[in-house]
Structure formats: structure tokens, C-alpha cells
Amino acid sequence: MAAKTCAACDYELDAHAIKVEIGGKTVEVCCEECARALKEAHAAAAAKTPA
């Protein structure tokens, strides 16, 4: 069975994983820093997408 990894940095997740909603999907990250990085990257990508 494959271990779950952080959606931002591929670090192996443990019982302290943080769930973050990005673009309507829930993903798990290893720490607040990765959660913030994913949110910022998603916001930047959304801002570049023409409406």
C-alpha cells in the first residue's frame, strides 16, 4: 500500500496532516507552510485565467 504524501512537497503524511480545499477539491498537506503555498499558487493561477 502506498503512503499518502503532501500535495505540495511530496513529504510523507502522518496523523497530523492538514486538509485544505483548493479549487473545490480537498487535498492533504504536511504543514501550514505547504497549505499557504498551495493556496497562494491556486490564487495566482486563478488570477491569470481569463474570465
Image (cartoon, rainbow, N blue to C red):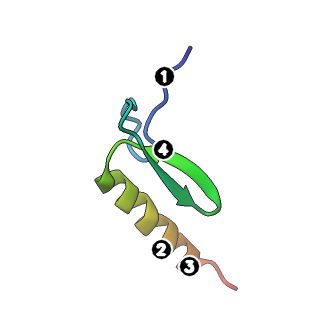
Say whether disc 1 or disc 2 marks the residue closer to the N-terminus.
1
Q: Secondary structure at mark 2?
A: helix
Q: Amino acid at mark 3?
A: Lys
Frontmost of labels 4 and 2 is: 4
Say whether disc 3 or disc 4 marks the residue closer to the N-terminus.
4
Q: Amino acid at mark 2?
A: Ala
Residue 36 occupies quadrant? bottom left
Pointer 3 local density, CA inside 10 Å: few below 14, some 14–19, many at least 20: few
Q: Which residue is mark 3?
A: 48
Frontmost of labels 3 and 4 is: 4
Q: Is residue 47 above or below residue 25?
A: below
Where residue 18 appears, as percent x and y from the top left, is 41, 47
Residue contact at pointers 3 and 2, CB within 8 angstroms: yes
Where residue 4 appears, as percent x and y from the top left, is 49, 29
Q: Secondary structure at mark 4?
A: strand
Q: Which residue is mark 2?
A: 44
The residue positioned 49% from the left and 73% from the top of the image is: 43
**Separation (CA) of disc 3 from disc 4:** 24 Å
Q: Amino acid at mark 1?
A: Ala
Mark sitting on residue 28: 4
Q: Nearer the viewer, residue 27 or 11?
A: 27
**Separation (CA) of disc 4 from disc 2:** 20 Å
Q: Which residue is mark 1?
A: 3
